[in-house]
Image (cartoon, helix red, strand yellow):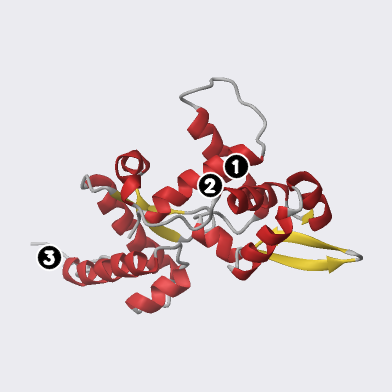
Amino acid sequence: MLETVKQPTLPQKQPAFSPLRSKGKMALIEAALYVTGRPIDLKTLGSVVGFRSEDKTRELARLVKEKYGSDGTCLEILELSDGRFVMQLKPQYVKHVKKLASRQLLTAGPMKTLSFIAYRQPIPQSYLAKVRGNLAYSHVKQLREMGLIAEERLGRTKILRTTPNFADYFNLSHDLPTMKKQLEKMFQSIKASKMSKKTPMNADQVKNALTARLEGKSLSP
């Protein structure tokens, strides 16, 4: 009688996260996104949950993102193009509750100046003043003090550009070409119900797009 060869028992592959362990760490991801109200990179999220691996942190953050996408909550978690994650109010709820939002970050004048800088950057301050008028100088001072723009000297003028703080506040990419594409997309989504044909953006349209994003931001946790 032939003897059968007993095959060695191979250890079963362990899941990346045990249900109990991942539930607690997912809650930490939610807490971090809730309390900051801005995009957070994987290194920072990893430090919160105790992971050195960005791949594990990304996998966990995506589980939280999927949870918010399927449970019908008014909040959503987005994975940005640069790998960061952010929690915000879903766009369809903004119009119903925006009147309850706190005072806006900026009034219309500085917001329009900021929008012009964001879409035209890097831009000479002299050109900005020519287009926006002498009030642009006071707007620039306010925006600089708020950390939304930075300036560098070039000859007799200054070159203006937005800061990482600006990108974080409006949930935009730090990469300039990507940021401009995001602004374009934001504007087109706002205009979709009114126009079927794409039109070039101007400062007013960028302002409207940023204001819409700001309303959602101010209503986020």
Q: Which residue is mark 3?
A: 3
- Name the residue located 65 percent from the left edge and 67 percent from the top edge: 144
| Residue 194 appears in the figure | yes
Foreground pick, 93 / 86: 93
Mark 3 or mark 2: name the one nearer the start of the chain. 3
| Amino acid type, mark 3 | Glu
Q: Nearer the viewer, residue 77 or 116?
A: 116
Q: What is the spatial separation of the Cα atoms under label 3 and label 2, in whole angstroms? A: 75 Å
- Residue at 60% x, 42% y: name it: 206
Residue under label 1: 206
- List x then y, in percent, for residue 53: 43, 73
Determine which quarter of the picture holds residue 94: top left
Q: Is residue 144 left or right of residue 27?
A: right
The mark nearer the N terminus, 3 or 1, is 3
Asked whether the residues under the numbered discs 2 and 1 touch, taking CB atoms below 8 Å apart as contact, a structural biologist would say: yes
Nearer-the-camera pick, 41 or 31: 31
Residue visible at 40% across and 49% down in the picture: 216
List the residue tagged with mark 2. Answer: 210
User: What type is the residue that disc 1 sits on?
Assistant: Val
Looking at the image, which residue is at 67% across and 37% down? Answer: 202
Q: Residue furthest top?
A: 196
Q: Between 99 and 150, which is closer to the camera in this rendering?
A: 99
Residue 62: quarter of image:
bottom left
Residue 117, horizontal then vertical, whole percent: 69, 52
User: Callout 1: helix, strand or loop?
Assistant: helix
Name the front one of labels 3 and 1: 1
